[in-house]
Image (tube, grey):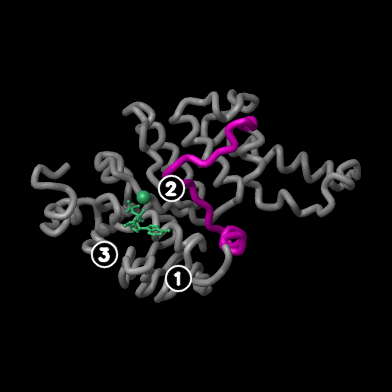
Amino acid sequence: MSLLQLKNTTIRFGGLVAVEYVDLTIEKGEILALIGPNGAGKSTIFNMVTGIYPPTEGNIYFSGEEITHLKPYQITARGIARTFQNIRLFKDLSVLDNVKIGCHNHTKSELWGALSRLPAVKKEEAEITDKALACLELTGLSKKRDELAKNLSYGEQRRLEIARALAAEPKLLLLDEPAAGMNSGEKVSLANMVREIRDMGLTIFLVEHDMKFVMGLSDRVVVLNYGRKIADGTPEEVKKNPDVITAYLGKDGV
Ligand SMILES: Nc1ncnc2c1ncn2[C@@H]1O[C@H](COP(=O)(O)OP(=O)(O)O)[C@@H](O)[C@H]1O
Ligand SMILES: [Mg+2]
């Protein structure tokens, strides 16, 4: 059974078909890249998988369970977390607080304010802090824990988004253009970090334009063009595919 399966997935916005009859699977432990020109529907696929925009047609399954019409928080609870193409952080909060917000059990104790003096709540708070610190360690941001998010470099902010997504303890991690705006050194360490996260047992689904990054990191690549899937294979297969070269890569390849 695939970890994630999209079956005939279609979404229309008014008259525009953003994603059309896409079939796609991700196996547990894979690093799968979704590539294609701007406007091809890549982020929209992430939005459907995470419940932001349910598909107009088709079905989405996670670990065999249909999640097509679940709410975003229900999908997060089942083990899917993401980052966004446009960084979404609480810029005036500390790095540590941004990650604590990602911990999915952070509202487990109701009446938080009133009860916050009780020992059980104190213990939960400590557990959340420990978990958030572990996520910062993994993303190389431990030393920045007390900085405000807005004072981080662009590359560090992208890592912080990953740390926050990891705090939800996902099985499947969706990364929307994680290397955008990074320099080549930052990209190399990002690729190493993504591999490390996969080796810890997670599955990675990423959208990225940097073909060197994509082809070096991914086990499999899916290509989208005008909302339709035009290729699905290993990096070597996809690089040689004439349809992909015409639609996206260009004849010089990568
Ligand atoms: N909420 C929305 N309302 C209307 N159109 C949308 C919406 N979200 C995405 N689209 C359209 O769907 C198409 C695919 O967008 P997107 O998934 O963001 O592309 P990509 O991430 O591949 O660059 C674009 O034409 C975009 O304008
Ligand atoms: Mg996008």
Picture residue at 40% right of the left edge, 62% below the top: 27
Name the side, left or right, on which 119 lies relative to 11.
Answer: right
Image quadrant for the C terminus? top left
Q: Nearer the viewer, residue 199 or 107?
A: 107
Q: Position of residue 166 (x, y in %)?
A: 56, 46
* Mark identifier at residue 60: 1
Q: Alpha-carbon neighbours of circle 2 within 10 Å: few (<14), some, or many (≥20)? A: many
Quadrant observed for ligand 1 in the rendered image: bottom left
* Mark identifier at residue 175: 2
Residue 244 against residue 208 in the figure, above or below = below
Q: Which residue is mark 3?
A: 229
Question: Magenta segment range?
Answer: 72-95
Image quadrant for the N terminus? bottom left
| Labels 2 and 1: the sequence-earlier one | 1
Callout 1: SS: strand
Residue 217 part of the magenta-drawn span: no
Q: Ligand 1 within 8 A of label 1's CB?
A: no
Callout 3: SS: strand
Name the residue type under label 3: Lys
Circle 1/circle 3 CB separation < 8 Å: no
